Image (cartoon, rainbow, N blue to C red):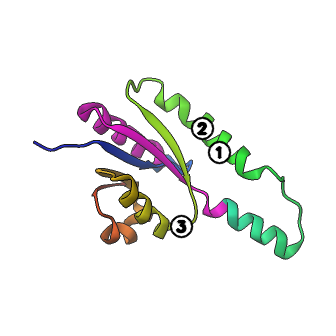
Protein backbone atom coordinates (compact mmCIF):
# COMPACT_ATOMS: atom_id res chain seq x y z
CA UNK A 1 0.00 0.00 0.00
CA UNK A 2 1.13 3.54 -0.72
CA UNK A 3 2.09 5.52 2.37
CA UNK A 4 1.60 9.28 2.14
CA UNK A 5 2.58 11.24 5.24
CA UNK A 6 3.16 14.80 3.99
CA UNK A 7 1.63 16.59 1.03
CA UNK A 8 3.21 19.86 -0.09
CA UNK A 9 1.37 22.39 -2.24
CA UNK A 10 2.46 25.73 -3.66
CA UNK A 11 0.26 28.75 -2.95
CA UNK A 12 1.18 31.73 -5.07
CA UNK A 13 -2.19 33.51 -5.19
CA UNK A 14 -2.90 32.30 -8.73
CA UNK A 15 -5.96 30.47 -10.06
CA UNK A 16 -3.77 27.41 -10.58
CA UNK A 17 -2.78 27.48 -6.91
CA UNK A 18 -6.44 27.20 -5.90
CA UNK A 19 -6.76 24.08 -8.06
CA UNK A 20 -3.52 22.72 -6.61
CA UNK A 21 -4.82 23.21 -3.08
CA UNK A 22 -7.99 21.29 -3.91
CA UNK A 23 -5.92 18.34 -5.20
CA UNK A 24 -3.57 18.49 -2.22
CA UNK A 25 -6.44 18.60 0.29
CA UNK A 26 -8.02 15.56 -1.32
CA UNK A 27 -4.77 13.58 -1.23
CA UNK A 28 -4.00 14.60 2.35
CA UNK A 29 -7.54 13.70 3.45
CA UNK A 30 -7.50 10.29 1.79
CA UNK A 31 -4.18 9.34 3.37
CA UNK A 32 -4.48 11.19 6.68
CA UNK A 33 -1.37 13.17 5.72
CA UNK A 34 -0.19 16.55 6.92
CA UNK A 35 -0.80 19.32 4.39
CA UNK A 36 2.01 21.84 3.97
CA UNK A 37 1.19 25.02 2.05
CA UNK A 38 4.28 26.81 0.83
CA UNK A 39 4.76 30.28 -0.54
CA UNK A 40 8.00 31.29 -2.24
CA UNK A 41 9.11 34.63 -0.76
CA UNK A 42 11.58 35.19 -3.63
CA UNK A 43 9.53 37.96 -5.26
CA UNK A 44 9.04 39.75 -1.95
CA UNK A 45 12.78 39.69 -1.29
CA UNK A 46 13.48 40.84 -4.85
CA UNK A 47 11.18 43.81 -4.32
CA UNK A 48 13.24 44.80 -1.29
CA UNK A 49 16.43 44.52 -3.32
CA UNK A 50 15.01 46.69 -6.11
CA UNK A 51 13.78 49.21 -3.58
CA UNK A 52 17.28 49.53 -2.17
CA UNK A 53 18.83 49.73 -5.63
CA UNK A 54 16.49 52.39 -6.95
CA UNK A 55 15.84 54.15 -3.62
CA UNK A 56 12.09 53.82 -3.56
CA UNK A 57 10.29 53.23 -0.28
CA UNK A 58 8.64 49.97 0.73
CA UNK A 59 6.91 49.05 3.94
CA UNK A 60 9.38 47.81 6.55
CA UNK A 61 7.07 44.92 7.45
CA UNK A 62 6.36 43.85 3.86
CA UNK A 63 7.33 40.22 4.53
CA UNK A 64 4.96 39.90 7.49
CA UNK A 65 2.12 41.61 5.63
CA UNK A 66 2.64 39.26 2.69
CA UNK A 67 2.44 36.24 4.99
CA UNK A 68 -0.76 37.55 6.60
CA UNK A 69 -2.34 38.22 3.20
CA UNK A 70 -1.49 34.77 1.87
CA UNK A 71 -2.90 33.07 4.98
CA UNK A 72 -6.07 35.16 4.82
CA UNK A 73 -6.67 34.22 1.18
CA UNK A 74 -6.18 30.49 1.70
CA UNK A 75 -8.01 30.09 5.01
CA UNK A 76 -11.34 30.09 3.17
CA UNK A 77 -10.14 27.23 0.97
CA UNK A 78 -9.12 25.24 4.04
CA UNK A 79 -12.36 25.60 6.02
CA UNK A 80 -13.55 22.16 4.93
CA UNK A 81 -10.19 20.45 5.50
CA UNK A 82 -10.29 18.36 8.67
CA UNK A 83 -6.62 17.37 8.82
CA UNK A 84 -3.47 19.05 10.04
CA UNK A 85 -1.93 21.77 7.94
CA UNK A 86 0.69 24.46 8.19
CA UNK A 87 2.15 27.27 6.15
CA UNK A 88 5.79 27.52 5.15
CA UNK A 89 7.25 30.65 3.65
CA UNK A 90 10.36 29.58 1.79
CA UNK A 91 13.01 31.79 0.26
CA UNK A 92 14.45 31.91 -2.34
CA UNK A 93 13.61 30.15 -5.55
CA UNK A 94 13.12 26.68 -6.88
CA UNK A 95 16.44 25.30 -5.61
CA UNK A 96 15.36 25.86 -2.02
CA UNK A 97 12.18 23.95 -2.73
CA UNK A 98 14.17 20.80 -3.49
CA UNK A 99 16.11 21.22 -0.22
CA UNK A 100 12.92 21.77 1.75
CA UNK A 101 11.25 18.69 0.26
CA UNK A 102 14.23 16.55 1.19
CA UNK A 103 14.58 17.97 4.72
CA UNK A 104 10.86 17.60 5.47
CA UNK A 105 10.53 14.12 3.92
CA UNK A 106 7.66 15.24 1.72
CA UNK A 107 5.84 12.29 0.16
CA UNK A 108 3.87 14.10 -2.56
CA UNK A 109 4.23 17.62 -3.97
CA UNK A 110 1.30 19.21 -5.79
CA UNK A 111 2.78 21.99 -7.90
CA UNK A 112 1.61 24.19 -10.71
CA UNK A 113 3.26 23.94 -14.10
CA UNK A 114 5.73 26.77 -13.45
CA UNK A 115 7.65 24.24 -11.30
CA UNK A 116 7.94 21.70 -14.11
CA UNK A 117 11.62 22.49 -14.65
CA UNK A 118 12.53 21.59 -11.07
CA UNK A 119 10.65 18.26 -10.96
CA UNK A 120 13.69 16.10 -11.87
CA UNK A 121 15.53 17.38 -8.78
CA UNK A 122 12.69 16.63 -6.35
CA UNK A 123 12.90 13.52 -4.20
CA UNK A 124 9.18 12.82 -3.94
CA UNK A 125 6.21 12.04 -6.14
CA UNK A 126 4.90 15.11 -7.99
CA UNK A 127 1.49 16.05 -9.32
CA UNK A 128 1.58 18.99 -11.75
CA UNK A 129 -1.57 21.08 -12.10
CA UNK A 130 -2.43 23.63 -14.76
Check residue 82 for magenta coloring.
no
Q: Please report the residue visible at 47 percent of the width from the left and 70 percent of the height from the top.
A: 95
Which residue is labeled 1 in the image?
67
Asked whether the viewer can see residue 130, the reply is: no
Q: Please report the residue visible at 50 percent of the width from the left and 47 percent of the height from the top.
A: 15
Which residue is labeled 3 in the image?
93
Q: Please report the residue visible at 39 percent of the width from the left and 39 percent of the height from the top.
A: 35
Q: From the image, which quarter does the N terminus lie in?
A: top left
Q: Label 2, secondary structure: give it.
A: helix
Q: From the image, which quarter does the C terminus lie in?
A: bottom left
Mark 1 and mark 3 lie on one chain; the one further toward the N terminus is 1
Residue 51 sits above or below residue 35 on the image: below
Check residue 42 for magenta coloring.
yes
Tags 1 and 3 touching, CB below 8 Å: no
Q: Residue furthest left?
A: 1
Q: Label 3, secondary structure: give it.
A: loop
Q: Residue furthest bottom?
A: 53
Mark 2 and mark 3 lie on one chain; the one further toward the N terminus is 2
Mark 2, residues whose alpha carbon is within 10 Å: few (<14), some, or many (≥20)? some
Taking the image as shown, residue 53 lies to the left or right of residue 99, namely right
Start and end of the magenta stretch?
17-43
Asked whether the viewer can see residue 5, the reply is: yes
Which residue is labeled 2 in the image?
71
Taking the image as shown, residue 116 lies to the left or right of residue 41, namely left
Amino acid sequence: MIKVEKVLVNIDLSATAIKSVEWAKELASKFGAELILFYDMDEVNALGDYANLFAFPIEPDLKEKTKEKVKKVFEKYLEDFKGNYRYEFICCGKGKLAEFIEQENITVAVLDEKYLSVVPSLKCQVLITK
